[in-house]
Image (cartoon, coloured by chain):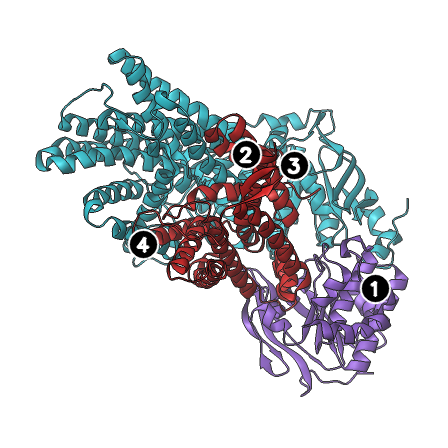
Chain colours: A cyan, B red, C purple
Amino acid sequence: MADITSQTPQRSLSPYWTTAIAAALALAVVLTAPLYLDIYLTNVLIRALFLGVLALTVDLVWGYTGILTFGQSAFFGIGAYACALVFTHWGFGPGWFVAALVIGILAAGLIAWLVGLLSFYHGASPLYSSIMTLALPIVLVQIIFSGGRFTGSSSGLSGFPTYYWSINTWFIIAGVLLVTVASLAWLFVRSDFGRILIAIRENEDRCAYLGIPVSAIKTGLFVVCGAIGSIAGFGYAAFTNVVAPELAGFLLGTESLVWVALGGRATLIGPILGAIGIDVTSSYLSGSLPFLWKFIVGVAFVVVIILLPNGIASLVTGAWRRYKTRGKDETAAHRHRSNVTLVPAKSRRLEENLSDDKAPILIEALTCRYGSLTVLDGIEVEGRRGELLSIVGPNGAGKTTLMRCISNGGERTSGEVVIAGEKIGRRSPQKIVELGVGRSFQNTSLFDSLTVGDCLRLARYRIDGASYLERTERVALPEPALEILKATGLGRQLGLETRYLSHGMKRGLELAMVLATEPRVLLLDEPTAGLTKPERTAIGDVLTRLVEDYGLCVFLIEHDLDFVREISNRIVVLHQGKMLLDGSVEEVVSSDLVKAVYSGQETETPA
Amino acid sequence: MATLFLDILTTSSMLFIVAAGLMIILGVMKLINFAHGAFLTVGGYSAHVVTDAGFNAWLTIPAAALVGFVLGIVVERVILRPLYDRPLDAILATWGLGIVIAQVITFIFGRGVQFAESPISGTADLFDISYSSWRLILVLVAVVLGAALTALLYFTRFGLNARAVIMNENLARGLGIDSVKVRALTFGLGAALACAAGALITPLLSIDPNMGLPWLVNSFMLVLVSGVAIPGLALASLLLGGAQVLVSTFVSPIIGGITIVVLAAVILRIKPQGLSRG
Amino acid sequence: MSALRKPESAESVLTVEGLTSGYDAAPVVRDVSFSIAAGEILVILGKNGMGKSTLLKTIMGFVRASSGKVHLAGENITNRPPHLIARHSVAYTPQEYAIFQDLTVEENLRLGVENDKLLKERLGDVEAAFPRIAERLRQGAGTLSGGEQKMLLLSRALITRPQIMLIDEISEGLQPTMVARMAEVLRATKEKNGVAILLVEQNLPFALSVADRYAILKIGEIVERGDVAHADTAATLEEHLRI
């Protein structure tokens, strides 16, 4: 099969080079700045630079991934206290220095991991997760208070031994740390993995149904950011020679949110400038106009959240974008440069389909109750390889609930779903995707700001993984997915942001993404809703081929009964949560019982 | 023993009173008001102003409630309404508001600690011990408040509309309920309750620009655990408040300070809907 | 009975002109026009997913109309907020999540009227139509059977004493005797109180037993319309709607 390439292949500078150049420039500034700045400003800037690193971690966790976190300061504080405690109570020297740094990193990482386990499980509300991140610094500060002489309680520790290097040296250390972290972060957010973070922020649920381990990723990111925050805190304490509980408290945590919100979420440079700008200005004004300054910051924060949710940096990026796209028409303006190349994947799964003897999917006595309402009652169905089973029934019959119960182990009240011999138990959606179930949804909620190519790449995460530093060019997709892309013309739109796709194309993209996860059972919920006639025919052809040539087992919910008649091998009729009939197309279509149900005349389901 | 029992009862009552306003806001607007602590502070300072001006100390409570209501209506209109579709941003905006309010208060009153006169001072004799009268009054207040809120929710038209909006906002709108107005009035009421709570607790604590802060997180946790129901909140206040008192008495006051937070985190992890649904 | 009523009658309660709503590229409701006069029942027929519910939601202001107009008794209500439209004496019964499960029967009914005095006065309407509901005021709505819940739904709409009712698939899942009762109640309402009713239905016999006129919606457009009284209507409709 020929490669499908996007319209405008570009020869652009590799991200490694652009980052290296920018970093070099920044380092040059760092090395020369102290020569021009007075001592007070340099002093203030060193602290601000360490805080800038903290702001970066908040941007990664909140700006990019969407986890509203009040508690990154806790990790900053852990690093700071590791420094102070080790140097005060155990010893000082190069060995101790490294040891304290490592202790800080490990402690921060461990605590971040625990908080992650507690807060980021599947189905946790964002509110709950945020409140947990708020609880973290509060608990930590109380622990510090209760430490008595050991931790210095509310007065903190000071005067512990540290390296009394010159101000300029410290400036360079802080600057180098910031530039290094910023450069790595920059590569990271532009990499494949960075796209996944954005996808999690925009539509976490959809990510789970593509097999992306959202909870693990959030926790992992939290741990890494905690470790980085701890390093920054360590540096801060080593430089200032003072630690106090405020460094770990939630006031600092919320301040970091202010820096990121004002500077510009998900821009990296915005939060850094925000942190440095606000911190430096505070130092100068805290003597003369303390309340007025905090008041101004508070008001600016509220105003920015309401009117400029993307921060002040968005004014700049917005202007830049308008400049770049002047003179181009609407869609061209939203097409990004895309280096994505689609290639056929070596999909073992689809070949396995043809040789497997266990039933791809078995539903046993499935019952689903919400309170006193019984939505599904004792459903028994077996799906077969190479068969398209349509599920029909009046509204409220329980069709979508059935799909939910299959794709999410936690939904049903009783009964079991067995995928290729494996019971799903209470597994979360992402684990069920691993068993080989792919699901499409009634509404087309995709990832608005990601491009078509990005979406396809991210759908392959479970099978192909994702690079942490690079944007891979080749995306391997199974044949059926490639066919859909060709049929819908999406293959030529790899650089278009999905929010600009027509409804029909979004449906096609969604189907391609689900197929990219190489499922053996495909659950489709009203795939033709809102499509034009030619689009319906196209989807119908693809589904028929999936079933006949690739041996997939497809469950389809549809209202368009003509469509159902044309492409189904079998039809199951649901009514008021019970299975009315399970038979071939002719059997169902000619059944009087079914006709009566559809016209509302029959309401009792015969036993 | 009697002291412990009364401590638990009075602490739970204080927590209930402080958290009630936050809970009705969460219920109707699905929003956690991070300015809650600032509203408590405003209530405290209103009490100070009233008693400083020579008025009867009992007037501090209605005065604070009035200030809170007006403030709440303005805040809802200006800050919260534009953020209806962005709940996480709304939380942040209320936090920013809290900062602004704290600065304004500091600007007007200075950083120092203030005091307000207590309507009732001294102790009462109960169960063979002398116990702070005002604390005992708060138990009464909590009970009356719980009853009044329940009456409002279940016996008035506003309460019916509010419950309808809580259960299904779109259905309520389809029946002619102006859900925007319900939300605004609810926020006003929640703010009024928060300020009144501030005025109620000042006789027991001092007044300073950050007095509301320690209550903020505990209130959140209680409200989340309560499952947004008045009996749930009462139960949560009793259980978690009781636990806090026990830990503070028998282990250490500092660890006692985080008892509510830790217990709530655990409860919510096991039962995300809180204590009220079955 | 109403075979010759012209759509552009001066007594038209609801007039819909060129209404389009839904996704931009593939609208769910396309260029729909019709009008209903007082004391008249128009039924919108069509298979699932053809846009019937969306049509009602658009009229009610829940879904934005991208073009077209909706007039209620002469006043333009296009894209107004739902609660204002409801207060214009429009009773809307949605297909799903239509009653408050956790409120009592009485509280559900109360939400249909402005104050409790009106509730007492109008309870008689409910008693006449569905005595079973009037007997169970204190019961939690969620504990009613499916059929009783639909009766409650219609009672709530009746108690509003609206000038027009928008009813979405109310016969769904009901036993034949109950469906017949519903039909009786609707006919009585239209005849006694001159209420206009826009009915959305898939149940053909029920629809034909109450409606004066019909319109068939297919992929968002009205493809056929006419009077129910005509002889071959039932057969034509069966054709269009066969499984």
From what the image shows, is residue A390 above or below residue B61?
Answer: above
Q: Residue A603: which numbered mark, if any?
A: none
Mark 1 or 2: the one toward you:
2
Q: Residue B109: which numbered mark, if any?
A: 4
Name the kind of residue labelled 3 in the image.
Answer: Asn
| Element assignment for label 4 | helix
Q: Residue B245: which numbered mark, if any?
A: 2
| Element assignment for label 2 | helix
Name the kind of residue labelled 4 in the image.
Answer: Phe
> Circle 3: is it few (<14), some (14-19), or many (20+) Cα within 10 Å?
many
| Element assignment for label 3 | loop
Disc 2/disc 3 C-alpha distance (Å) = 42 Å
Q: Could one spot residue C60 in this view of the protein?
A: yes
Q: Residue A408: which numbered mark, if any?
A: 3
From what the image shows, is residue A320 above or below residue C168?
Answer: above
Residue A102 position, x and y percent, is 35, 18
Q: Are marks 3 and 1 on the same chain?
A: no
Q: Residue furthest bottom?
A: C10
Disc 3/disc 1 C-alpha distance (Å) = 38 Å
Q: Which is nearer the eye, A145 or A64?
A: A145
Q: CB under 8 Å between callouts 1 and 2?
A: no
Residue A568 position, x and y percent, is 74, 44
What subunit carries mark 3?
Answer: A
Q: Which is nearer the eye, A291 or B205?
A: B205
